[in-house]
Image (cartoon, coloured by chain):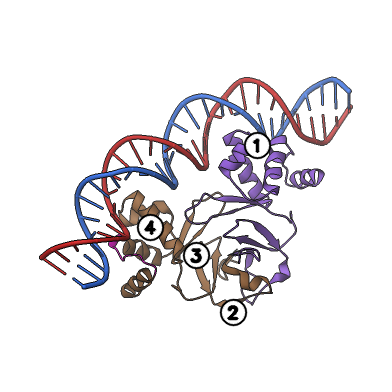
Chain colours: A purple, B brown, C blue, D red
DNA sequence: TACGTTCATGCTGCAAAGTTACAAAAAGAC
DNA sequence: GTCTTTTTGTAACTTTGCAGCATGAACGTA
């Protein structure tokens, strides 16, 4: 996992640093708010902000906003795994990546779409 | 339109107030940031914050976050129109509601999903 | 393995965003 | 109109996020 992370980051011109590993490691256990990441990693506020932006830009992390709550940062399981959908459970607040063929979009929209976010209740919480 | 808004709000136990009408009216002309809504409506900051949260919770408004930009608030064209998908163009920053049958999700996920957000380039911007 | 370049981190301080509490005003039912 | 309940606006406050800069760490090269 660690060497995989390094490879992914290097491909995007980013270095594999201790703080970045910490953040990804924390997110592997589930979505977290910025405050939770601060507390869990003990890193500087600013460092967490900056790295979350970078990790989002390279597609390793996405952000979910539920009205009335702090934004959550979710680790994408398929680093650079091409087109797929993100499912997020509004109750237990966990995220899953669904394979591309889980969802079909009719033309002409299919060609236009490049990111998919699905919200709902997971099988457990339904 | 106005009486329809009132009905929708009342169904959710919310009152139809002047500030709420103003916000919805401003959003009818296209997605807006919080700052733009402030400026357009002349309302108090706090009132706009609170109402945007409420309008999101009742499903009249949804929020789109593009990394590196301020969050945009988009009016949903089908108030309470049942299940459908939101398509948002990352370039021209307009939102459209797509009918339910535009997207098909395989079981068991179909039953779990209750909100869909698609990001991409619209037919014009592609 | 040591070296040097380049990028990342952690400060500090600052502006903007967002929250809380509460009295006054407006909405809606009668 | 009157009464009850929800909303609003104001003010004080907390949090979020950004810019600049010196120190320290990553990593390609020899």
Q: Closer to the camera: disc 4 or disc 2?
A: 4
Residue B51: assigned label: 4
The residue labelled by disc 2 is B101
Q: Report the front residue among C9 and B13.
A: B13
Q: Distance between the residues labelled 1 and 2?
A: 44 Å
Q: Closer to the camera: disc 3 or disc 1?
A: 1
Q: Looking at the rendering, which quadrant does residue A92 occupy?
A: bottom right
The residue labelled by disc 1 is A41
Q: How far apart are marks 4 and 1 (CA)?
A: 35 Å
Quick one: label 2 or label 3, which is nearer the N terminus?
3
Quick one: label 4 or label 3, which is nearer the N terminus?
4
- Expressed as whole percent of the image width and height from the top left, the position of residue A17 reads 72, 36
Compared with C23, A121 (above or below) is: below
Q: On what subunit does the disc labeled 1 rest? A: A
- Expressed as whole percent of the image width and height from the top left, the position of residue A93 reads 60, 56
Residue B18, magenta (yes or no): yes
The crowd level at tag 3 (other Cα within 10 Å; few <14, some 14-19, many 20+) is some
Q: Report the front residue among A76 and D14.
A: D14
Quick one: label 4 or label 2, which is nearer the N terminus?
4
- Secondary element under disc 2, as helix, strand or loop, is helix
- Secondary element under disc 1, as helix, strand or loop, is helix
| Majority secondary structure in the magenta region | loop
């Amino acid at each position: 996992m660690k060497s995989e992370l390094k490879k992914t980051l290097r491909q995007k011109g980013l270095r594999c640093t201790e703080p970045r590993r910490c953040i990804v490691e924390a997110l592997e256990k589930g979505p977290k708010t910025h405050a939770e990441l601060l507390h869990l990693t003990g890193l500087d506020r600013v460092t967490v902000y900056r790295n979350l932006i970078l990790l989002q830009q390279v597609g390793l992390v996405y952000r979910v906003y539920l009205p009335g709550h702090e934004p959550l940062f979710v680790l994408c399981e398929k680093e650079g795994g091409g087109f797929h959908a993100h499912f997020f459970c509004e109750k237990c607040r966990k995220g899953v990546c669904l394979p591309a063929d889980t969802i079909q979009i009719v033309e002409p929209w299919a060609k236009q779409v490049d990111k998919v976010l699905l919200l709902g209740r997971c099988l457990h919480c339904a």
